[in-house]
Image: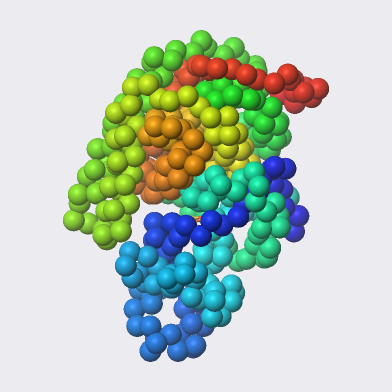
């Protein structure tokens, strides 16, 4: 299977172990459970999995120990991988942090920005197609995002304007090329992408309004903060989940308490630009409702990460941005942002480029759109 990737996308694992801690660690394929049971794991490591009744039989999750996967070793390596090889691991472990968008020819391979190692390796790591050998052959479960848009449904490129998926499949590569040509901070990138989408729709782009945009951003984050604090203090869920929500609440609270975010570092802008292009290529951007809402959510994440990082260097901002992205993979948070489609769309319309340093349009810039 041929894989489409961003030409400049690279990645290496930084062995931070975040992905072995901040997820539900499942579901595990029944065949994987049976194979590991046959190796005698039940006797050797009681509690290595947990099962819950599901509509089609039991649903399995890996067990936890000290708030991490039961197979995470002291040396930060995976015990299953060390002892039995990669093939013995559940599919979701083998897939992470990659995302394979199937159903398109060629399939698209990207890295989840929730990976805390991406910011360190996006420019110097292993090219993606080499970093993910065998991924295309993995029997991955289809992506299940609550209330996700069916793949054959029209794609909302602007509020009230939808196009057929085949039309969006032609527009997306042009937008990715366009975004890659924009130098500057995320506001400049959003504004340039907005102009391109309005041009593609044959409409005039409305004037931005930065103070109203900030008002909307703060309102959304205020509401999110209430949800996160409630989840952190709830007696529902497990300790690691409460910890996860408490950390996320600290991040959002820190961003909200900052009136004047620090200036951007150029390498931070380059990183966030690649993240946006990856979200476009994978179509993850559409899970917030449409292109406008998804782009606004990406921008909001960049705003949170920068506002919560006093130095705003890549080393400082990268892990915070990854925490934000992990948060936006949480079902409760996905549902919150789905319900906030209208303010997100407004945010998309109102963000103003504070420092626009767009490169000269390439030869095919306009004809693409
Ligand atoms: S979060 Fe990313 S860098 Fe950290 S261990 Fe997982 S894959 Fe590696």
**Looking at the picture, does residue 9 appear above or below residue 265?**
below
x then y, percent, for residue 31: 52, 78
Outermost residue to the right: 363
Query: Residue 367 appears in which quarter of the rendering?
Result: top right
* Residue 233 in view: yes
Residue at 73% across, 19% down = 360
* 90 displayed left or right of 105: left
Q: Nearer the viewer, residue 277 or 153?
A: 277
Q: Nearer the viewer, residue 197 or 90?
A: 90
**Looking at the picture, does residue 116 appear above or below residue 256?**
below
x then y, percent, for residue 340: 37, 32
Q: Which image quadrant: the C terminus?
A: top right
Residue at 51% across, 27% down = 264
* Residue 159 in view: no
* 59 displayed left or right of 292: left
Residue at 69% across, 47% down = 5
Q: Which image quadrant: the N terminus?
A: bottom right
Query: Residue 218 appears in which quarter of the rendering?
Result: top left
x then y, percent, for residue 195: 61, 18
Residue at 72% across, 48% down = 4
* 107 displayed left or right of 273: right
Task: Name the image colouring.
Answer: rainbow
Outermost residue to the front: 311
x then y, percent, for residue 244: 32, 51
Q: Nearer the viewer, residue 369 or 237?
A: 237
Q: How many marks?
A: 0
**Looking at the picture, does residue 208 appear above or below residue 278?**
above
């Amino acid at each position: 299977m041929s894989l489409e990737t961003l030409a400049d996308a690279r990645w290496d694992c930084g062995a931070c172990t975040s992905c072995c801690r901040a997820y539900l660690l499942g579901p595990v394929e029944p065949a994987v459970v049976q194979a590991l049971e046959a190796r005698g794991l039940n006797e050797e490591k009681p509690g290595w999995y947990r099962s819950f009744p599901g509509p089609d039989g039991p649903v399995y999750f890996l067990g936890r120990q000290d708030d991490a996967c039961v197979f995470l070793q002291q040396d930060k390596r995976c015990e299953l991988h060390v002892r039995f090889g990669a093939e013995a691991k559940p599919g979701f472990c083998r897939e992470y942090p990659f995302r394979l968008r199937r159903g398109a020819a060629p399939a698209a391979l990207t890295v989840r920005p929730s990976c805390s190692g991406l910011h360190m390796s996006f420019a110097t790591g292993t090219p993606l197609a080499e970093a993910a050998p065998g991924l295309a052959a993995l029997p991955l479960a289809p992506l299940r995002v609550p209330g996700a848009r069916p793949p054959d449904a029209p794609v909302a490129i602007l509020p009230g304007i939808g196009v057929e998926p085949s039309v969006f499949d032609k527009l997306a590569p042009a937008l990715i090329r366009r975004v890659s040509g924009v130098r500057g901070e995320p506001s400049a990138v959003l504004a340039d992408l907005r102009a391109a989408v309005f041009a593609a729709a044959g409409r005039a782009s409305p004037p931005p309004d930065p103070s109203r945009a900030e008002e909307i951003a703060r309102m959304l984050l205020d509401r999110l903060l209430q949800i996160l604090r409630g989840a952190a203090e709830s007696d529902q869920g497990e300790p690691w989940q409460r910890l996860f929500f408490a950390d996320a609440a600290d991040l959002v609270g820190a961003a909200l308490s900052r009136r004047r975010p620090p200036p951007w570092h150029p390498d931070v802008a380059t990183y966030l630009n690649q993240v946006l292009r990856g979200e476009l290529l994978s179509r993850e951007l559409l899970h917030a409702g449409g292109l406008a809402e998804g782009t606004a959510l990406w921008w909001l994440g960049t705003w949170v990460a920068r506002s919560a990082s006093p130095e705003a260097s890549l080393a400082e901002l990268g892990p915070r941005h990854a925490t934000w992205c992990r948060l936006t993979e949480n079902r409760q948070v996905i549902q919150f942002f789905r319900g906030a489609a209208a303010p997100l769309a407004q945010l998309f319309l109102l963000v103003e480029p504070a420092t626009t340093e767009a490169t000269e349009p390439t030869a095919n810039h306009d004809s693409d759109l």
